[in-house]
Amino acid sequence: MAPKYKLHYFDLTALGEPIRYLLSYGNLDWEDIRYSYAQWETVKSTMPYGQMPVLYIDDKIFAQSSAISRYLAKQVGLSGKDDLENLQIDQAVDLFHDFRLKISEWFYDPIPASKAAKKDRLKEQVPFYLDKFQEIVKENKGYLVNGKLTWADIYFVAPLKYYKALMARDFLEGYPLLQELVRKVESTPPIAKYIAQRPVGDK
């Protein structure tokens, strides 16, 4: 019998969204359980590491967005064909984490002076990472790994809406290959269907 999946995450995109894309891509049997920030404190103690996303697979609970995504990619055919491709996928995913952490560390910094300094550094950091991703996509015929869709592409594309919202701008302007990658991922029929149905207010 196929497993039943239950994703627990905030009522936004960010690190829960790659998991939603993968579950949708595979047409898996899943439930999208969302929490507001106001609800978080009441459920935090039930999470294995006090954070989300978490994924229930039947009655077992698992955490860490990359680990969950890597598992789901194997279930839906979006892993690499061999260890070398999987290394390329992991490299791209880790590079994305480096990129998004620069934005998050600035946005959520409560100290005005250090927050201002981090914002200044973003003027160089954001183009640096986007240039790298653009080079990778160019070298890999429109994708992040070997000219084909893998979970690395989904992990890059799915959270972008959230990080664009934090920065209050579309930082992909001027990066046509990355814009095209977004279009290809989000026009994949099962993912497009999910996007059309997700809550309108999602950022």
Image (tube, rainbow, N blue to C red):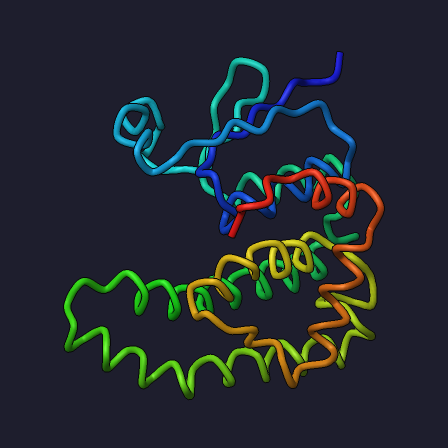
Q: How many marks?
A: 0
Give the image location of residue 77, x and y in percent: 79, 42
* Above or below: residue 65 compared with residue 169: above
Instruction: Please identify the quarter of the rendering in which residue 82 is found.
Output: bottom right
Q: Indicate the position of residue 150 as horizontal and vertical percent values.
A: 74, 55
Q: Along the line of sight, which residue is nearer the eye, 59 or 185?
A: 185
Residue at 63% x, 81% y is 173
Identify the residue shown where x is 68% and y is 42%: 22
Q: Quadrant of the N terminus?
A: top right
In the image, 176 versus 170, the foreground residue is 170
- Residue 122: image quadrant is bottom left
Residue 174, quarter of picture = bottom right
Q: Which residue lies at the image location 32% right of the left edge and 34% below the top edge? A: 49
Identified at 62% across, 38% down, the residue is: 71
Residue 120 falls left or right of residue 162: left
Q: Position of residue 161 (x, y in %)?
A: 56, 59
Q: Position of residue 112 (x, y in %)?
A: 16, 72
Direction front: furthest residue: 200
Q: Is residue 201 above or below residue 166?
A: above
